């Protein structure tokens, strides 16, 4: 039983650490730009990406980032990314992860 619990803890830790450093830094820099460029903000933004990583595997985070950037496109392509249900579900999952991050870190 203890082995199973340890295995589950390791699996959760691996999922939370599958974000490349570059993605984490990019998130923190963007977060700091939006919330103030202070040391305290850097700590809060670092906490935020860690919480998001607990909720979403990096592959999903990357897909949502693409969807969100494509939603700003004009025409049919933008409409597809704004209205397709599966994509909106992924965006909602990120929004929920960010809400948890805001509660825990800010």
Image: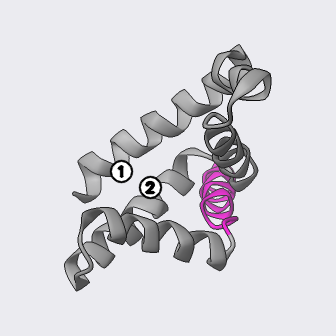
Q: Is residue 23 above or below residue 55?
A: below
* SS under mark 2: helix
**Residue 72 placement, left or right of 28:** right
Residue 80 x %, y %: 75, 21
For the record, the magenta segment spans 1-19
Pointer 1 with pointer 2, Cβ within 8 A:
yes
Q: Magenta span has 49? A: no
78 or 100, which is in the foreground? 78
Quarter of the view holding residue 14: bottom right
Q: Is residue 9 magenta?
A: yes
Report the label total: 2
Report which residue position mark 1 lands on.
101
Q: Position of residue 103 (x, y in %)?
A: 25, 46
Q: Residue furthest front?
A: 75
Viewer-proximal residue, 49 or 36? 36
In the picture, residue 18 is in which quadrant?
bottom right
| Residue 99, position as x, y percentages in the image | 35, 40
At 56% from the left edge and 56% from the top edge, which residue is drawn?
53
CA separation in Å, label 1 and label 2: 5 Å
Q: Which mark is residue 51?
A: 2
Q: Residue at x 22, y 57 (%)?
A: 106
Element on which disc 1 rests: helix
Prevalent SS, magenta region: helix
Task: Write the residue at 70% across / 20% down.
Answer: 79
- Neighbor class of circle 1 (other Cα within 10 Å; few <14, some 14-19, many 20+) is many
Quick check: 102 left or right of 29? left
């Amino acid at each position: 039983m203890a082995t199973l619990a340890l295995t589950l803890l390791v699996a959760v830790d691996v999922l939370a650490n599958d974000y490349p450093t570059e993605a984490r830094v990019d998130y923190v820099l963007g977060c700091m730009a939006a919330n103030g460029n202070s040391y305290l903000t850097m700590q809060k933004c670092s906490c935020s990406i860690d919480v998001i990583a607990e909720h979403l595997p990096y592959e999903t985070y990357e897909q949502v980032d693409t969807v969100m950037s494509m939603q700003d496109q004009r025409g049919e392509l933008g409409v597809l990314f704004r209205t397709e249900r599966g994509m909106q579900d992924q965006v909602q999952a990120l929004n929920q992860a960010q809400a948890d991050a805001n509660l825990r870190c800010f």
